[in-house]
Amino acid sequence: MQMNPEVDAWLVSYDNPMKEVVVATRAILLGADERLGECIKWKSPTFTCGGNLASFNPRSKKHASLMFHSGAQIPGDHAILEGDTPTARTVKIADLEDLTAKRAALEAVVRAWCDWKS
């Protein structure tokens, strides 16, 4: 798991009721595939592998929200990705229990993206 110190620093100053869920989601995403990296882009943690996979919406306070920038194009059937725009998709995570339920699906999305982009 490649944790970026820049993202660590961002999380230290992140004041949000969903911080625990964001931190746990980050760990799951980075643990899903060793090719996945992270950075701060658009003032938010962003996950990358051959391009931008997803970014947290840092203002979301009722759930953790991940925007998958090109989610509609990720190969495979990923029911966890919501939305109907030509490009972007989102995943909303209500709490740690919801994250546990969505873990395998999130990991599958990360692996599909990294396989596609590598």
Image (cartoon, rainbow, N blue to C red):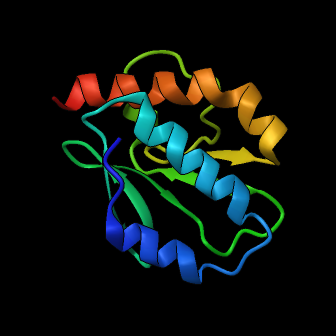
* Residue 62 sits above or below residue 35 on the image: below
* Residue 14 sits above or below residue 39 on the image: below
In the image, taking residue 82 as reference, residue 33 lies left or right, namely left
- Horizontal and vertical percent position of residue 62: 84, 63
Residue depicted at 63% across the width and 48% down the height:
24
- Horizontal and vertical percent position of residue 82: 65, 38
Q: Quadrant of residue 34?
A: top left
Residue depicted at 35% across the width and 29% down the height:
33
Quadrant, the C terminus: top left
In the image, taking residue 67 as reference, residue 73 lies left or right, namely left
- Looking at this rendering, what residue extends furthest in the top direction? 76
- Horizontal and vertical percent position of residue 78: 55, 22
Q: Quadrant of residue 32?
A: top left
Comparing 30 with 75, the one in front is: 30
Comparing 1 with 51, the one in front is: 1
Comparing 68 with 72, the one in front is: 68
In the image, taking residue 28 as reference, residue 63 lies left or right, namely right
Quadrant, the N terminus: top left
